[in-house]
Amino acid sequence: MTYHPKSEFLRVIIERGFLADCTNLQELDEALSNGMVTAYIGYDATAASLHVGHLLNIMLLRWFQKTGNKPITLMGGGTTKVGDPSFRSDERPLLSPAQIDDNISGMQKVFARYLDYDHGDNAALMRNNAEWLDELNYLDFLRDIGRHFSVNRMLSFESVKSRLDREQSLSFLEFNYMILQAYDFLELNRRYGCLLQMGGSDQWGNIVNGIDLTRRVLDNEIYGLTTPLLTTSDGRKMGKSQGGAVWLNAEMLSPYEFWQFWRNTTDADTGRFLKLYTDLPVEECNRLGALEGSEINAAKIILANEVTTLLHGAEAAKAAEATAREVFEKGGVGDDLPTVELSADEIGDGISIVQLFVKTGLADSGKAVKRLFSENGAKVNDVDHKDAGLMVTADMLKEPMKLSAGKKRHALVVLKG
């Protein structure tokens, strides 16, 4: 990008690789240069924890606040009742209000690790869009807000068009989502002077709708900014591991497993991820990312430590690195490895080794375990293992059993009590 911004925020995010698109970059730059700006990102409460796919935009909010601006984390207590259809092939399952509230509680823990909600003029705000969406009168909303939306234009947005082109059903409920998200931006502008909505590039259509609605109803100029949808250098969607989603809550994914996810970054992604997911200076990120051969492993450990420290604290990062050293360098079992505890009753006359690999999350199906065995990728207690028929008894678990999938992924199975 050839544009050289005056504001610190835009300078930082362009240099670090956060910027995909912006509705009016120069005007936004001017506003950011003239004082504190308020911006928001919305998070629907579809799960009990945020995952690594959300981390890019959480870091974006972090830099927004670090450069003197005010971030709002908007919890989608209202919009989750509808479900965002953007680039989905099917309708989201509807959640009860109690499930949504529980999910919001689980998600809120993460934000306080990255943002300061308590100090200074630019202390972050956390709001829930149920506050205004739950109170809407349908007829008033149709008359005052619905009249500003052209169905023809809504149908032209890629997120909707791609679904219709594949002849997949799009419910009237989901079709309303983009109107509700646009209304969020209008309300945040009216209540808090919020000038900017940020989000992943899949949210571009929803963001543009909010800008247009606010201009029509309040005659206010506001802006949108998106981040790239990240894939790893080998083409996988960022945030997916062999064991499934990489959750940010420690109850759903241990700090060790989180650390290990970053330690397993490919060489080609290391420098880029250091710039996006850590606070390290760009020059240092570039230096580390340019290392080659065995030296790049040191950069990956720094990446894993920095990202884990931000989310789980320095002690957790230190413990994860120590466990990794013990497991990989000394062949030990490590205190911090993911552990599955089984009672004698659960084991009964025996439990298959295939089931144990699935239970520990080292593989997501029996078929995947058998493939692991056939490709010499599995070890039991550091010894190569190929026997899919092995039944593990309670006697065999008097000492912890260490299972390994490849060189870097390990878990323990222990007898409860």
Image: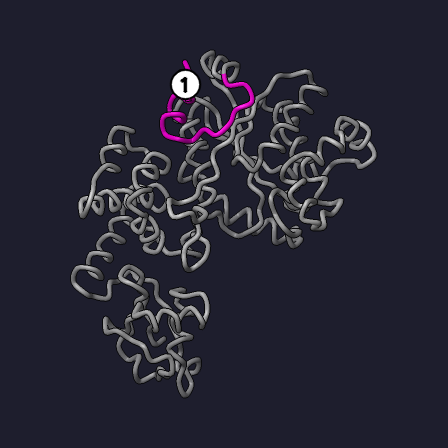
Task: Please tell me whether residue 53 is drawn above or below residue 14 in the rendered image.
Answer: below
Residue 201: x and y, percent?
53, 35
Farthest left residue in view: 330
- Identify the residue at image location x=83%, y=34%: 139
Q: Could you say which quadrant of the image residue 132 lies in?
A: top right
Which residue lies under the disc numbered 1? 2
What residue is shown at x 39% (from left), y 45% (from top)? 232
Rendering coords of residue 404 (x, y %): 30, 67
Q: Position of residue 53 (x, y in %)?
A: 46, 44
Q: Which residues are magenta?
A: 1-25
Residue under the image location 76 percent in, 44 percent down: 172
Furthest toward the bottom, the residue is 349
Kindly tell me whether residue 403 is visible in this rendering. Answer: no
Give the number of callouts.
Answer: 1
Residue type for callout 1: Thr
- Image quadrant containing the N terminus: top left
